Amino acid sequence: MPVIEVQNLRKRYHGRAVVDDLSFTVERGEIFGILGANGAGKTTTVEIIEGLRVPDSGTVSVLGRDPHDDWAELRQRVGAQLQESRLPENLKVWEALDLYSSFYPHPADWAALLDDLGLSDRRDTRFGKLSGGQKQRLSIALALVGNPEIAILDELTTGLDPHARRDAWHLIERIRDRGVTVLLVTHFMEEAERLCDRLALLDAGRLVAIDTPAGLVSRVAAELRIERASLDDAFVALTDHTLD
């Protein structure tokens, strides 16, 4: 049984469809990517999956539960890193992780998470003094500190330098290797191709394709007779509706 099921999801704002009849499933243990340009509906989709927004129509199931009605239970099993998150300015890094770990029956070793994310030397730094990239890494650590079955990561490497971004990729791969399902929202082609077992391409709130990164590239190469297609080529071709 899929751990996430999205069926005919719709959400409108001010008369404009942000998510338009979206359906997909996420299987246990995979890294499933949602890829699209800004405004494609990626964040709205994951916020509905997280129970933060209510869809206008359609259904969502996370671990067999309704994420809006049953989020009190699901928060023990799902970790979420939001695109933007705020903590009290004077809260120290270690205090935030210690606090969040207290919410879970079997938390991860947050000191090890600090090492993995390159934050050990910032453990006594207050949140308000962290750089944008450091805040992003702390947000990732907070999403993982509960040892979740599913980790939802929204633009997790935005604001990170290339070295820190690759460190984060290694961490996500290790998380998947432990059996955690990862739902990854990204607009970085390299990140999607490196990490994702399958990808859903969104354009203006609609699903235009879903496949493995290699499958998407092969489809474009075959249809357009490109000898060396890339994921960028696939994204452009599919969102421009140049393929059947």
Image (tube, rainbow, N blue to C red):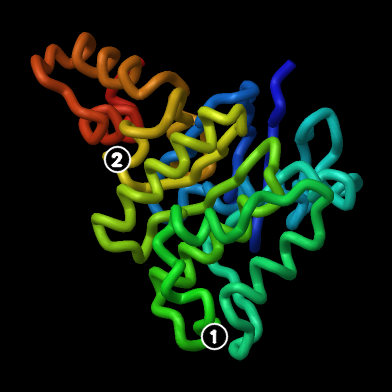
In the image, farthest residue toward the left: 227
Residue type at mark 1 is: Arg
- Where does label 1 land, which residue? 126
* Residue 166 appears left or right of 98: left
Sequence-wise, the earlier of marks 1 and 2 is 1
**Residue 125: x percent and y percent?**
50, 83
Residue at figure coordinates x 40%, y 50% from the top left = 168
**Residue in front for this viewpoint, 91 or 24:** 91
Picture coordinates of residue 2 (x, y %)?
Answer: 70, 21
**Helix, strand or loop under label 1:** loop
Pointer 2 local density, CA inside 10 Å: few below 14, some 14–19, many at least 20: some
Q: Amino acid at mark 2?
A: Met
Q: CA distance from mark 1 to mark 2?
A: 33 Å
Q: Position of residue 203 (x, y in %)?
A: 44, 40
- Using the image as rendered, state which of residue 149 and residue 19 is in the foreground: 149
Residue 1 at least partly seen: yes
Q: Nearer the viewer, residue 31 or 201?
A: 31
Q: Give the left or right position of residue 21, taking residue 227 as reference.
A: right
Q: Which residue is mark 2?
A: 189
Q: Is residue 82 visible?
A: no
